[in-house]
Image: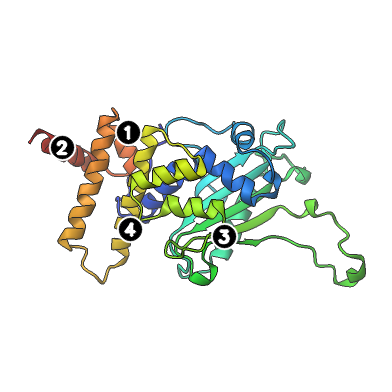
Amino acid sequence: MPEHLDNHDILDENTQKDSIAKFLLTHKQIVAMILREYFPEFKGWPLDFIKDKCLDGLEDTDYLIGDRTHGSAGTDMDVCIHARLPKDLDSQIGIIINIEIQKKFNPGYDIIKRGIYYACSLITMEKETVFAGSDYNGLKKVYSVWICLDAPLKTANQVIRYGMAELCQTDETQGVHKAGAAYDLLEIMMICLNDGCQKSGGPVIDMLRTLFSLALSKERKRKILEEEFSITFKQEEQEMLTVADYIEYVAEKCEERGIKLGEERAEKRAEDKIKNVVANMLRQGMSEKEIQILLGVSTDEVRKLIHDVQTNAQS
């Protein structure tokens, strides 16, 4: 099972981000689709090859691939993946990919700047882990990928990229004088989603919109992801589609602090939904500790949920 998450309140944004990113965005088939579509290093390579050869160092058990990573300055990242390059499978690390879920497109600061900070943090972490001493030729390229769930319509269902380029003002007629590989080591990628915009952004955008849609039930999501995108889920992974919906729903309610969270019908729907999730987990044979880790709640909270579910089942 994945390492124990901090006992944040289930309404906490970190719980939402951990659950969605760790249990959904680290699915090998999903990662392989993103890599082939948006990463030039993987363009044209078969999805199964990327999944089995380039991501084979990732642990493929339970719900979790990748790990929670703290950068050099204590940066708490959602997902950090080390992938092999198709043309260099002998190297354990070809590129380093940070994937972040961003619920607010305008959180009060520029996401691009935060992405640059995260990418620089990854670069810094490479010293004495990816390369030693002054062997800076060993630096690997890093990507910081931001999946924005509420992008404005003008950028909806598009990918915006920011990278490094040479500016050679004294030699404009001759073009660049340094090969791109020497400095092309950092890129920020914003995948801009908007559930209300029906414009297709291509297969990966459409897949991610399905994955994070609040309008689709767990069953409908699974059906679309399997039939249209060939993404399959284990039985226990299917439950995380519901968990992600629940956390997203409650997070929305938390943001509406000017509106009473005590609207009885809304609270009852949320409570019933999480209890259904817990009931399904119990039917799968999960222990109290496993359920607590997956939901990111305290011991008292998970015990109360299990007690309520079992009491209802007996009545």
- SS assignment at label 3: strand
User: In this picture, is 300 found above or below 184?
Assistant: above
- The type of residue carrying mark 3 is Met
Q: Which residue, given by chain and number where applicable, does mark 2 sit on?
A: 307
User: In this picture, is 189 found above or below 43?
Assistant: below
Q: Residue at x 55, y 43 (%)?
A: 31
Tag 2–tag 4 contact (CB < 8 Å): no
Return the residue found at the far left: 315
Tag 4–tag 3 contact (CB < 8 Å): no
Query: How far separated are the C-alphas under marks 1 and 4?
Result: 22 Å
Q: Which residue, given by chain and number where applicable, does mark 1 sit on?
A: 290
Nearer the camera: disc 2 or disc 3: 3
Tag 1–tag 4 contact (CB < 8 Å): no
Relative image position of residue 267 (x, y in whole percent): 20, 57
Q: Residues within 10 Å of mark 4 (few under 14, many from 20)?
A: some
First reached walking from the N terminus: tag 1 or tag 3: 3
